Amino acid sequence: MAVEYAFGIDIGGTTVKIGIFTDDGKLEDKWEIPTRTENNGEMILDDIAASIREYLEKKEITSDKVLGIGIDVPGPVLGASVVNKCVNLGWGVTDVASKMRMLTDVENVQVANDANAAALGEMWQGGGQGHDNVVMITLGTGVGGGIILNGQIVEGNFGAGGEIGHMIMNPHEKQACGCGKKGHLEQYASATGIVRKANEVLSADQRESALRRHKKLTAKDVYDAAKAGDPLALEIADFVGRMLGLACARISCVIDPEIYVIGGGVSKAGDILLESIKKHFVEEAFHASEEARFALATLGNDAGMYGAVKMVL
Amino acid sequence: MAVEYAFGIDIGGTTVKIGIFTDDGKLEDKWEIPTRTENNGEMILDDIAASIREYLEKKEITSDKVLGIGIDVPGPVLGASVVNKCVNLGWGVTDVASKMRMLTDVENVQVANDANAAALGEMWQGGGQGHDNVVMITLGTGVGGGIILNGQIVEGNFGAGGEIGHMIMNPHEKQACGCGKKGHLEQYASATGIVRKANEVLSADQRESALRRHKKLTAKDVYDAAKAGDPLALEIADFVGRMLGLACARISCVIDPEIYVIGGGVSKAGDILLESIKKHFVEEAFHASEEARFALATLGNDAGMYGAVKMVL
């Protein structure tokens, strides 16, 4: 039988990543196009459809060989179809699946939130491979999350499934999270949050630390210093692990997953991060869930494309 | 077409509740038998099978009219079949579904944890009716929980799905929860926890309060006094509502349900409880989830039977 294809498309605020996969799930080719957010992002889907068409023509792939198109977006999605406003793209409520069907004549179009798609991708071919019940936590500028139960994305009734960056950790926090409320996980475990915590500790604590040598501290500096044994950096790293371990313990008493997959820029810290999350998780989790596993994500920035295409394969 | 039947069976530590339902989900008849926990509970399933047989003979219902048997137990269940130890019944790891099939010759047997079954029952014919994504919280001696997503019980990978009584709320708590760890929701929002908190407040605070007139305070006394406007009782009720509202806010950023159904003895307090949970939930929840609804359970002690039978109908 001839090979068939599907597209996995990850729409970000500045670029759209387009991947073409064979029907056995191999990434055959990938490229990027700019995300044109002007005029409320009205050209974004047209640009994607044009790019797909152009690629198929160039490679002489006929449209009956296209099994489907999976798309993820940086906003809440309902019914694997409708984006419920997406500030980064300039979109209001938009039925992305219907529009894409019209633009491409491909019937099988599915849409997901980007963090949820990344979780599905990591379950399928990344750090969560071999598991059906996966929680992915992406530690970047913010903290993203995606929940997969029985191999399916948990969208949530209001599109907020997996929004664990907004789990309240400290009801006494004075500073506001990006969402406007206070004390959320994102404020302590994102790259930004880690730097904020480090600067607080450096102001309040007089001890010498390698961290004082940096003009503009980054989360990577904190973990590098921690790996080198710097006591202050180790304390900060432990604090971050405790916040994430606590959050995972709370997630486990809700959905009790098999595995947590940790991704995003901060996850490049590697084992030191993973081990500190796990240590605090085991301390805080309900006993039945203590055996849950922790792994690093492996698909990097391609995770969204993988998860997007998985929905249509 | 002749009516067909199914059984919903709720196995508790002292009695087994047996319900026979018609295929359209009407509870036709119900009765109880004692739970014989002696000899590691080896007779429990035989007793149930005998009681079913006896009933069918008496009513002249032939076995081909029995569509299935749903069972719930007070312990973790895996694969809707195997109970992973159940201290209250004296059971080790027990394949309840297979045993019941053998004892009754009924092929369609499904098993669930009791709190999960109650959640499914309330979704089907109780306080969560009309909704597919339901969280039920049972406030009794302990705090039980059950999660329904897309109409299905979330069992969890280690059988701990919906164990929200063991969500950590206060990492600084000195006293231990029944599970051995510290600071869990159950320690603040169960009937026992509410009384403990009330006694702490009454010792620490010198204000006059109707609560001081009770020799042995109950959670009901606290809510009765709160309804009568007693300031101390109102503060305790607000504290309980805050703990539950916070827990629900955390649950919402994981699975983002449509509705929370509150049951168990404490829920007889009614609106005063519901309103205080909702108030704190809205304060603490991620904005997208703020519209989640709150309702009281309506099936009382029959919820488990309803949920059990729902699994096989």
Image (cartoon, coloured by chain):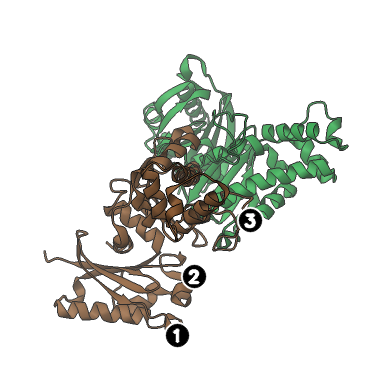
Chain colours: A green, B brown
Q: Which numbered tag is attached to residue B39?
A: 1
**Relative to residue B82, is residue A36 drawn left or right?**
right
Q: Earlier in the sequence, mark 3 or mark 1?
A: 1
Q: Residue at x 58, y 26 (%)?
A: A15
| Residue under numbered circle 3 | B174
Q: Residue at x 38, y 75 (%)?
A: B98
How many residues crowd around disc 3 within 10 Å: few (fewer than 14), some, or many (20 or more)? few
In front: B193, or B3?
B193
In front: B45, or A121?
B45
Q: Measure the alpha-carbon separation of dots 1 and 2.
A: 18 Å
- Residue A52's place in the image compared with A129, above or below, is above
Q: Measure the alpha-carbon separation of dots 2 and 3.
A: 30 Å
Residue B115 picture quarter: bottom left
Of all chains, the one bearing label 2 is B
**Relative to residue B193, is residue B56 drawn left or right?**
left
How many residues crowd around disc 2 within 10 Å: few (fewer than 14), some, or many (20 or more)? some
Marks 2/3 in contact by CB < 8 Å: the verdict is no
Q: Helix or strand or loop: what does disc 3 sit on?
A: loop
Q: Helix or strand or loop: what does disc 1 sit on?
A: helix
